[in-house]
Amino acid sequence: MTTTYEDTKQQLLDAILIHVPFDGWSEASFRAAILDCNMDDTLARAICPRGAVDLALAFHARGDAAMEDRLKSSDLSELKFRERIAAAVRFRLEAVPDKELFRRGMTLFSLPTHAADGAKALWQTCDLIWDTLGDSSDDVSWYTKRATLSGVYSSTLLFWLGDDSPDHQKTWEFLDRRIDNVMQFEKIKAQVNDNPLFKPFLAVPNWLAGQVKAPTKIRADLPGMLNPRK
């Protein structure tokens, strides 16, 4: 059986996970993973040029994939849309096998040199949630939905890391409150937009917002395209 690039990367990822709780997503953990896999150092560094950083991002992507699979296999048809969002966030957090792995990742991506990678990973998670739930917006709301969810998800994640309640019940209650806050804000925003007294003042801002379009996404299933899920 042929071993692919992605297979080898996942092998390294599996190997590093037992070292991360002790040494973090660090060079020491990466070297230990290479030894555990009995892998050539040059090959490992060709696959992961940034070492443990690349594996930390692969770990995040693995959690996103698990969340996506669970969303697609779950029957959410009876849930309100806000409940589907809450379920997606919960599925994402429950995809983490060990909080310490995530905690160490947050430490890594809080460093200035890797902060952009962390922000991108967070955005990709929220983008995946909206896409999987069927969001078809192509205007400025594409951005506002993902930005709002990023705030909800990141604050819930921080609460979850410190939550020791049974089945993380306090976290899910916190998540519901955060979504309630967002829904209340959206309700007020809609009332303002519908108020004829404000329409003259909102004409220009609304026109500008109407010029913003969602980015064009490249399909990964076209011939010649690299699909990271394969």
Image: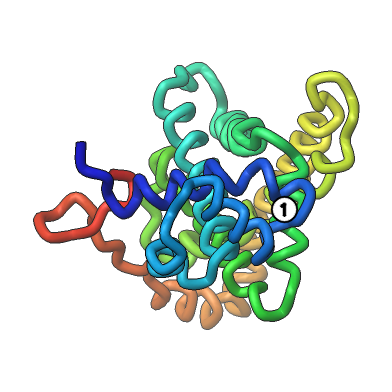
Residue in the picture at 39% in, 77% down: 211
State the quadrant of the N terminus.
top left
Image coords of residue 52 (percent x, y): 59, 62
Residue in the picture at 66% in, 52% down: 186
Colour scheme in the image? rainbow
Q: Secondary structure at mark 1?
A: helix
Which of the 4 image quarters holds residue 109? bottom right
Against 216, residue 103 (above or below) is: above
Q: How many marks?
A: 1
Against 208, residue 59 (above or below) is: above
Which of the 4 image quarters holds residue 91? top right
State the quadrant of the C terminus.
top left
Residue in the picture at 52% in, 63% down: 54
Left or right of 164: which side holds 157?
A: left
Left or right of 155: which side holds 123?
A: left
Pick whichever, 84 or 95, lies toward us.
95
How packed mark 1 is, by other alpha carbons closer than 10 Å (few <14, some 14-19, many 20 or more), is some
Image coords of residue 86 (percent x, y): 64, 34
Say if residue 182 shows up in the picture.
Answer: no
Pick whichever, 9 or 65, lies toward us.
9
Callout 1 amino acid: Ser
Say if residue 224 shows up in the picture.
Answer: yes
Image coords of residue 87 (percent x, y): 60, 30
Pick whichever, 212 or 228, lies toward us.
228
Disc 1 marks which residue? 154
Pick whichever, 74 or 63, lies toward us.
63
Image coords of residue 112 (percent x, y): 71, 79
